[in-house]
Amino acid sequence: MATFLYRVGRLAFRRRWYVALVWAAVLAAVGLGALKAPGAADEGFSMPGIESQKAFDLMEQRFPGATADGATARVVFVAPNGQKVTAADHKKAVEDTVAGLADGSQVASAVNPFQAKAVSKDGTTAYATVTYKVAADGLTDASKEQLEHALQEARDSGLTVDAGGSAMADGGGAGGTAELIGVAIAAVVLLVTFGSLAAAGLPLLTALIGVGVSMATILALSDALGLSTTTGTLAMMLGLAVGIDYALFVVSRYREERARGRAPQEATALAVGTAGSAVVFAGLTVVIALAGLAVVGIPMLTKMGLAAAGAVVVAVLIALTLVPAFLGFWPNAVLRRKDRKQARPGKEPEDNGGTRWARFVLRRPLPVLILGVVGLGALALPMTSLQLGMPGDEAKPTSTTERRAYDALAEGFGPGFNGPLTVVVDAKGDDDAKAAAAAISKDIGATKGVVSVSPARFNEAGDTAVFSVVPSTAPTDEKTKDLVTTIRGERPGIESETGATYEVTGTTALNIDISEKVQSALVPYLIVVVGLAIVLLLVVFRSLLVPLKAALGFLLSVLASLGAVVVVFQEGHGAGLLGVETTGPIMSLMPIFLVGIVFGLAMDYEVFLLSRMREAYVHGETSHQAVTSGFRHSARVVVAAALIMIAVFAGFIGESDSMIKMIGFGLASAVLLDAFVVRMAIVPAVLALLGDKAWWLPKWLDRILPRVDVEGEALTRGADTPQPAPADQEAARV
């Protein structure tokens, strides 16, 4: 592996113009494809294999066209204190508003609340449902302006008016300001790390090129592969983070080789052969973790994982080809000014903060290990009370009209009104479908925790009925989950009495089913991802204990980060500091996101840090000396890489969307804990306690495993006396 990558780096350096032109052509081609591709539509969320999805599919089959994905807006009217919306002047204002909303060119219907009996018992609150002919992303600016204008006219009459629903979605997502903040902080970190504008700018430039190629490819293939507009969010986030990190690893090794007196071309080839090997295997672990998201069984999540994995592959290819090509263009610009004069051959780096920290840990490994494990364990404890769900409008800031509409409906109609259950009755094999539906409706209505049941609505064939069930508790309340379980548990008895069957769906039931499926998929996902990564690390480091230690350390950090998420977003401690106004259940996909993404990123630091230790150990240093050498060469770079990752992810904490905020906080805290507690403290402490046993591998297994030479032993064997070749001397003068 190292020898092959050495040749790749050398070729990219010598043929730098060809490499740069090839990447420019690729970027232009996919960019043109993205411009010509039809706009990606927002893909409907689906999860095969759960009851909610089966019920929804049955509704689409038996009620063709009725479940079309048209946008909806629920407009809530609240009368001033002491008054009622049924008063003549308020009633007229409401009816005029609904009539104005119905005139929109994209509006399918606008239901008058007084005709639909959508008025609270105390008469203070009413709501009107507006249904559009197109999906939310198809609404024109004129339709949105008409909705806002109608709401403002109703407010001018003295009513408090707010609106929720898919029509109110702004269509925005993560990115923009968050990415700019992350890039700005990354630039500062790189500048401090390298002390050179060119060295700081090179990883940023190549990472942005990689993200451009990845995002343009996703947009170009969105229609052909059925990718949604949200698919690229994760690809953008990870592509930027790993793109900077991988280029940082290669440039850092190049500067190190130049400091030893090697000529630019040889230094570039050695950097790609050694650091590039670590980049390849670190990238493979990320790809394994992301591609493994397919195990969960959520099509949207699978596509997001594969798209992000593609972005990581692009980042690896750029680090191995475009970065050495750019080093060929500017071989001296990436060095510090004081280092631009040819260094003396064989000069080793002086002691730095990394070596001092390593020696500190090596002198007292047991206390460091105990402190690290106990600290992470304490942070992980709150995870035992983890509640999964899908936060909705109730999690949005009170400054949004969606949140105010949610609160007004909950106050006027009860907390369960915002999350009604939908029951689909399949009476195809029953002689009296109406009687069967009525019996099922009566039995469910008598269930404890049910406030009301709507009249059943039948399809044209008369063999399928649909009715709504309003719980007494909020959509994210644990009692609502228990109610869904109870209703489904009563099904066998009801079916035996009526001869008809039924299923429970709706947004609330769907979210409950998603949470349960994600929880059940988490253990198989961990086994697949961690198992494959252990095998990969076994091949890379030729050790039994190092991969196991890496996996256990990762589990500690990811559990601790989940505990931190629970403390802030579920229990509310420090939530105000992050702009979190409402606490509640943790997003169902959060554990999967953390496990998949953070595992891959954690292995980045593991591979880069341990590969330098392995390299020193293979070249004759003792186990303790190898730890110190690894930290001398890698600690500064790993710290910089982790800070860049944290900066990119933490930028998303500033987003208004609570789910994006949660993802940003979770990923940033996970990288912080894994890089600085696990990799920088627990790892050297464990290696110090194990000594030579850390690198032990049974002879029979050693014979079976392929040799990849990630530490570059074959390269350094013949490169101990660097003498510039004529071509290199010429390049050095560029």
Image (cartoon, grey):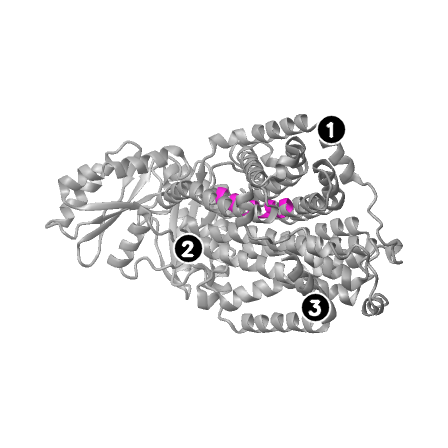
Q: Nearer the viewer, residue 552 or 196?
A: 552
Q: Is residue 570 above or below residue 264?
A: above
Closer to the N terminus: mark 1 or mark 3? 3
Q: Check disc 2 and report the residue beneath it.
A: 299
Give the numbered dot on residue 363.
Answer: 1
* Residue type, mark 1 in image: Arg
User: Residue 128: x and y, percent?
Assistant: 38, 51
Task: Give the answer, above or below, for where 579 lies relative to 18.
Answer: above
**Badge 1 or badge 2: first in the primary sequence:** 2
Q: Would residue 177 be seen by someone viewing this image from the given angle?
A: no
Quadrant of the frame with the N terminus: bottom right
User: How far apart, in angstroms, are the residues tagged by discs 1 and 2?
Assistant: 50 Å
| Residue behind mark 3 | 11
Asked where in the image residue 354 lies, by quadrant, the reply is top right
Secondary structure beneath disc 2? helix
- Pinpoint residue 509: horizontal percent, then vertical percent: 35, 43
| Residue 37 screen position, x and y as percent | 51, 71
Q: Residue at x 67, y 45 (%)?
A: 614
> Callout 1 environment at 10 Å: few (<14), some (14 to 19), or many (20+)?
few
Distance (Cα) linking label 1 and label 3? 44 Å
Please name the residue shown 44% across and 63% down the image: 226
